[in-house]
Image (cartoon, grey):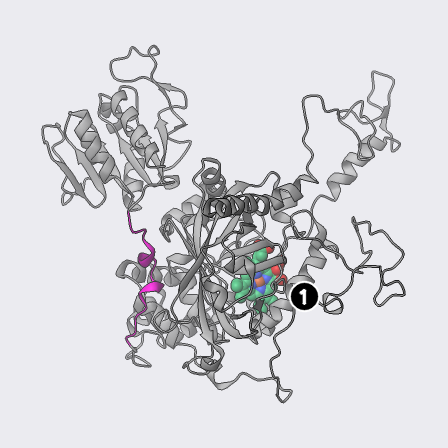
Amino acid sequence: MASITTAFKHALASVTENAKIKDMERDQVKPTAKSEMTTDFGGKISDTDNWLRSSDGEHVGVSLLEDHIGREKIHRFDHERIPERVVHARGAGAHGHFRAFDNRAAKWTMAPVLTDPSRTTPIFIRFSTVQGSRGSADTVRDVRGFAMKFYTEEGNWDLVGNDIPVFFIQDAIKFPDIVHAVKPEPHNEVPQGQSAHNNFWDFAGLQPESAHMVMWAMSDRGIPRSYRMIQGFGVNTYTLINAEGKRVFVKFHMTPELGVHSLVWDEALKIAGQDPDFHRKDLEEAIKSGAYPKWTFAIQVIEEKDEHNFDFDILDATKLWPADLVPIQPIGEFELNRTVDEYFPEVEQVAFCTSHIVPGIGFSDDPLLQGRNFSYFDTQITRLGINWESLPINRPVCPVMNNHRDGSNRHTITKGSINYWPNRDSVNRPVPPSNNGKGGYEEYHAKQVGIKQRLRTPKFQEHFNQAQLFYNSLAEHERSHLIAAISFELSHCDDERVYTNYTQLLNNIDYDLAKAVAINVNGVVPEKALRPNHGKVDPTLSQVFFAPKKATIATRRIAILIADGFNMLEVEAVRAIWAAGQATTWVIGPRRGKINAEGETMGKGAGIVADHHYEGQRSTLFDAIFIPSGEHAKSLLTNGRAIHWIREAFGHCKPVGAIGSAVSVVNHALAIPEIDLADPKGSDSTVKSSYGVVTSGKYDVKSALADTALNISP
Ligand code: HDE
């Protein structure tokens, strides 16, 4: 019996799991070797290279407007662009699946997507930056969007979140102000992809409710290593409703399996120029190699009766719910396992809407969420037109049937003469579910009493307690990065009023922080703290907390730096070992092409084909570097670019591994006496490891490799 149930579940899972793939296939076209080029109206094209012109064969002659083929090609091209998103314009997306672990969430919600473990719900996630335009760089300091679309059997549920659990403002009416302030300044459209300018810090200094999120954005969270290594948060307070009609408040959390990791600032800056698509490519590379990014999905729940038992308002989006007060409870997991086939129809046209919810999930009075529920639908009309919900990537996998009609670009053809309700013909559908006794989405019957007014209630007035909690919870290195980041940004503000005001504001959060930044940027150095530090700490706010329980090199990119005369056996062995650990290895040599191994005659022998030459890629694009032994050490020693590779990787705190003769190269490059490097001649038989530099003097390849391979995990 059990096995029949399991088989049934698997069958069901595969049906639901593939529902969106099947749905999208309806609109797919695939050119084949036999495909012939046609116009959009299906006529075959004889010539796509030469405009129709009147010519005597010797002189080019005039181009004729008559050329319908030429005109169609240009018309289509002229109208290819649509408005980019007003925020979150730059992004990358992928398809995947969500599964509930079991029905543990059923006591709070009747939504099958969160409670039915036999279901595999297709999802699409779009990650994004906020400030920059569509062509901006991936690694800029910014918040990352984490927008999820669940194609459930009850309709689409869009959970439009960020990688930071709180927001800059409390009331939606301030959104245009914060976005105008952070976006490029209106007079010259500068800067691109960054908040390091007068207007942002001016606004932030005058709108202290943003202080908490500013701390997060300036921390390492603002410069993630990968979309696969960010947390996601629903941010707003939503509600869950169970089968008995009982309601609770909820916050959603997504935690990446690989841990939460960041770049260092110098790397982020360099990668922005060296590979502006770094995050987009990283996501694609991981999924295509089968290393599917995974997250656990968790909720925090507050019972209705406890709503007012906190010293902050649980509907204030500038506040998180500390994990020691409200436990974070995992209820499911999801992975991304399919890249998009075409960017524009999928990633550009995907459109999220916070008001897309399914039975069992509801809104709260969170004033930011209420405004979002209006804004998202509205913005999609400008971007995609009123029929945006029927685009392939946006349409649900369950039936859609209603009396909405027309609008530009209507594709759906609904049969029948009736397009209103009620109608004279009872057999005509659609029938509203309440009329035929089956339940549709029903709003929770919440009592509303109030006086119409514009206000913020008292608990919304406190802005610094949680900014302080965040600061207190950071590890030492995270704090120094935070100080450096705020200092960098304020140094880019040349209006004295801006940086003096902000350094004063910082003293509400922490005296040492305010002092350090003020000294760096010529701000107001405080004499004493403005308010005592409450000393509270929440370990779950530091990235360190999310380090995977077992260290892993999975999906890490390791560069193997070589020149002619490298030790082939070592390279082959480490590549095999690291591939087994799901890391990828890339050979970097003096040229892209064959590099000769030790003992081979130049130009002959199998050698190894380098993936890139020293100038073709930079150490910034890798997580670790390794140099095998061999006579190539002599040329590496005298190659400035190779030495720079080692220095730069070391400066970015990356593991640097070397064997035998390569140890002297590392010694020479780093020239830091306190680093405990192995004997350059290779007679030392112990593996030494210090500051991420792992060296082995052994020539016993097997054990040396074992040592190095094990120790190189980033
Ligand atoms: Fe958004 N936001 N937002 N936002 N947001 C948009 O919708 C808005 C907010 C977030 O990948 C826009 O489709 C208002 C919080 C993401 O397509 C727009 C307010 C959070 C994305 C909009 C907020 C977000 C958007 C622009 C304050 C984290 C990208 C294009 C009340 C929980 C979605 C679009 C994608 C996009 C409005 C605040 C996340 C204009 C009015 C808080 C991830 O409608």
* Residue bearing mark 1: 440
Q: At which x and y percent is residue 442?
A: 65, 71
Q: Is residue 151 among what the camera can see? A: yes
Residue 699 in the image: state x and y as whole percent: 15, 25
For residue 543: magenta?
Answer: yes
The vertical placement of 170 against 255, above or below, is below
- Residue 19 colored magenta? no
Based on the displayed image, in which of its 4 quarters is residue 590 positioned?
top left
Residue range of the region highlighted in magenta in the rendering: 535-550
Q: Quadrant of the C terminus?
A: top left
Compared to residue 77, the image places residue 383 above or below, namely below
In this picture, residue 585 sits left or right of residue 74: left
Circle 1 SS class: loop
**Residue depicted at 28% across the width and 48% down the height:** 550
Dot 1 amino acid type: Gly
* Relative to 506, residue 696 above or below: above
